[in-house]
Image (cartoon, helix red, strand yellow):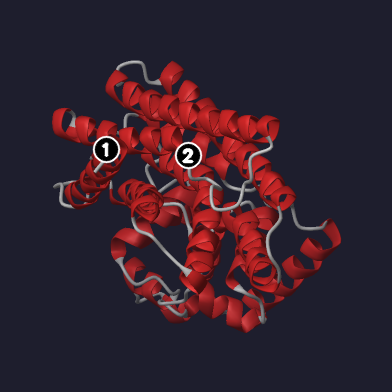
Amino acid sequence: MNILRILILFGVFQGILSIIAINSLPKQNRPANIWLSIFVFMINFNLLQHVIPTYGITKIVVRIILNIVFSTYGPVFYLYVTQLITPSPLPFKKWRIHFIPALCYFVFLVFYLFSQEPSDLFFAISSVGILVHAGAYTARSYWLIQRFKKKVKEIQIYIRYLQTVILLITVCLSVFLGSLIFKFVTNTSYQDEFLNYDLTLTVLALCNCALGYFLIFNPLIFKHLSTSTEEQSLSQAVLKQVLPKKKQMAENELKIWKHQLTQLMDKEQPYLQSKLSLEDLATLMNLDKSTLSRVINEGFKMNFYDFVNSYRIEHFIALTQNSKYQHYTLLGVAYESGFHAKSTFHKAFKKIKNTTPGAYQMELSKKSS
């Protein structure tokens, strides 16, 4: 057994231990550690395919998977860095866009590799494409780290850890690029050697070793990052960079939906239902939840709960002026208006009217008298 094989197996073993360890830590940063586990798993797959021989159809399948693994290294690490310095989990709808190129590449590979013998030109173009793709995401990750470094100077261990991994990834990409140039200059065949370079595998094994080092000596990295006000504002800024921006709704479309929503609220009074949800209101409007949420946010400059509570408060004020409800307590009228809790009612009233219900009623009484 040669030295490279021993190093690869050690790297795989270290990667397995790291995956188990980071997912067993108390108070772990689970969203970030999931992405890290995926990243390490891909490294392990890449290392193992070098030491486990494959033949026939299995070899083609492994080659396809290997290509896809290399095309997703960049997005997975970028999302890991983002999640590490962002407090809330990234929703599926927001991060899936980063894997569209890999999905398209996978579909193309399946049809291509099973239909004809791959050419050297195909492997050369694929290699360059993967390098550019991975390099772009590595650069974006580095930008996030630098931004994080400037804003959160007191947490240097995070910076050293991320910079170390970035350095190893950069070395890996550089070695891979050098191997491609060497093969092109020497006119060596790409087939059976694609992405299978000793130096590249060595650096990948070192990535797992570096992860194990930080896991042993600085396990805090893999737990939740402290969330000071400055860090939260930074995280929100980072999140805006990661998540694709939504286009504002067209003015005419927004105007139509606002009018229909206002009519619905005035005529059918759905806000009187104490358990009214965004989904319930969207059903009444024959809209999906996201569209209705945008109509309320962009058209009324409110969130859903403030929007509904504003109608309840106006209804509450109207009922207090109605002689039929004079024997009701203020809280009783609030319940009739759709509120289900005293604390919610007082908080909403104070937020919208900038005063308490009792003080507001006294003011109305003075004006009427």
Q: Mark 1 points at which residue?
A: 7
Query: Where in the figure is residue 283, as x and y percent of width and height?
Result: 59, 82
Q: Residue at left 35%, top 61%?
A: 344
Compared to residue 165, the image places residue 322 above or below, namely below
**Which numbered tag is attached to residue 218?**
none
Q: Residue at left 28%, top 22%?
A: 157
Amino acid type, residue under disc 1 in the picture: Leu
Q: Name the residue under label 2.
A: 197
Local SS, label 2: loop
Of 15 and 272, nearer the camera is 15
- The answer to which of marks 2 and 1 sits earlier in the sequence is 1
Compared to residue 248, the image places residue 109 above or below, namely below
Left or right relative to 126: residue 369: left
Answer yes or no: is residue 317 visible. Answer: no
Q: Residue at left 60%, top 66%?
A: 290
Amino acid type, residue under disc 2 in the picture: Tyr
Compared to residue 292, the image places residue 44 above or below, namely above
